[in-house]
Amino acid sequence: MSVSAAFTPTGNTVVINAATSYPPAVQAPSNTGTSMQYRIINASTTVGCFLSFAQSQSTAEANCLVPNVNVSTSVIHVLPNTDEILTFTPSTWFTAITAANSCTLYIVPGEGLYLC
């Protein structure tokens, strides 16, 4: 499937309940094994989070830190109330952490883009 087509799920949705301590990393495998895009939805209207991703559970968890002037790490900031399509390698492991409070992320493996 072309990445210029509408997003099509290829695997099950995984849920991350991010808080000031990261939860165990979860893997978002694709049913087809070819998934490179992931739809990431932050259901919180007020709390953003830092999404950690890696090819192993232990690396995703080790990288899951809130960055600051003294700490640099492989995370992506996910704003509150957002719906993003990001590209990662197939069967990526994810976890997330917040600077304060908590939020819920939904991650769906698939192919394509979010078209409005």
Image: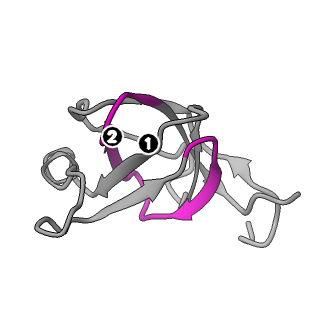
The amino acid at mark 1 is Ala
Residue 63, picture quadrant: bottom left
Mark 2 falls on what kind of element? loop
The amino acid at mark 2 is Thr
Q: Tally the numbered discs.
A: 2
- Name the residue rendered at 24%, 52% in the picture: 66
Residue 15 in view: no
103 lies above or below 41: above
Residue 104 in the image: state x and y as whole percent: 48, 29
Q: Is residue 99 magenta?
A: yes
Q: CA distance from mark 2 to mark 1?
A: 20 Å
- Name the residue rendered at 48%, 37% in the picture: 47
Q: Using the image as rendered, state which of residue 41 and residue 49 is in the foreground.
A: 49
Name the mark on residue 98: 2
Boundaries of the magenta span = 80-103
Q: Earlier in the sequence, mark 2 or mark 1?
A: 1
Q: Using the image as rendered, state which of residue 102 and residue 112 is in the foreground.
A: 102
Residue 21 in the image: state x and y as whole percent: 20, 32
- Name the residue rendered at 23%, 60% in the picture: 67
Residue 80 in the image: state x and y as whole percent: 56, 43
